[in-house]
Image (cartoon, helix red, strand yellow):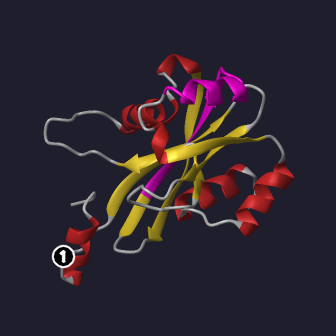
Amino acid sequence: YNRDPELRKSLPKQEKFNTLCISCLVESKDKAVILGKRGTTVSESQNSYQVTSAGFMDLLETDQTFLWDQVLRELEEETAMTKDQIVRDRVLCVVEAQQEYNTTVDICFLAYSKLNADQILENAKAAVDKHEQELIKISDRTEALRLLETERWDPASAATLMIYLGLC
């Protein structure tokens, strides 16, 4: 259901449910943040900026992983980062956002990496889902603010970056 926009559109209003998502902003060893610019061929948030990695929570009957395990899975898929490259993490916020066909609830994490920004970007060239987005590093608060003000953003990602920057 989460991954089929046509099915979501076809359901009556009383059958539409919130979608649980996870996202993670990565701060590199050299204090840059890694953001993604989504492509045109992805199913959600085309041509918009987002935090380093994001995705639907995979809640399978046989899956007994915790939230952080899913964040690590997304980070590995989208950046090729592994658990041992993360120093620490924390939940920054929970964001409810109305999307085109449903409401999402994102649990938004901040992860601190042992790698510098250039290493993260270089490693990401080998990521399984590298086609979903172009990763960029932002080392300057002014540039982050400019992007927030002038570009299209995934709502949870914008909120995560604003909290990270101390704007709310």
Q: Residue at x 48, y 34 (%)?
A: 75
Residue 98, image x and y in percent?
44, 73
Residue in view at x 48 percent, y 21 percent: 83
Q: Residue at x 56, y 33 (%)?
A: 89
Left or right of 137: which side holds 152? Answer: left
Q: Residue furthest top?
A: 84
Give left or right: position of 84 versus 143. Answer: left
* Lateral position of residue 87 relative to residue 108, left or right: right
Residue 134 part of the magenta-drawn span: no
Provide the secondary structure element on which disc 1 rests.
helix
Q: Which residue is mark 1?
A: 15
**How many other residues sit within 10 Å of disc 1, few (<14), some (14-19) or many (≥20)?**
few
Q: Which residues are magenta?
A: 106-126
Against 151, is 113 above or below? above
State which quarter of the image contains the N terminus.
bottom left
Quadrant into which the C terminus falls: bottom right
Q: Residue at x 80, y 61 (%)?
A: 146
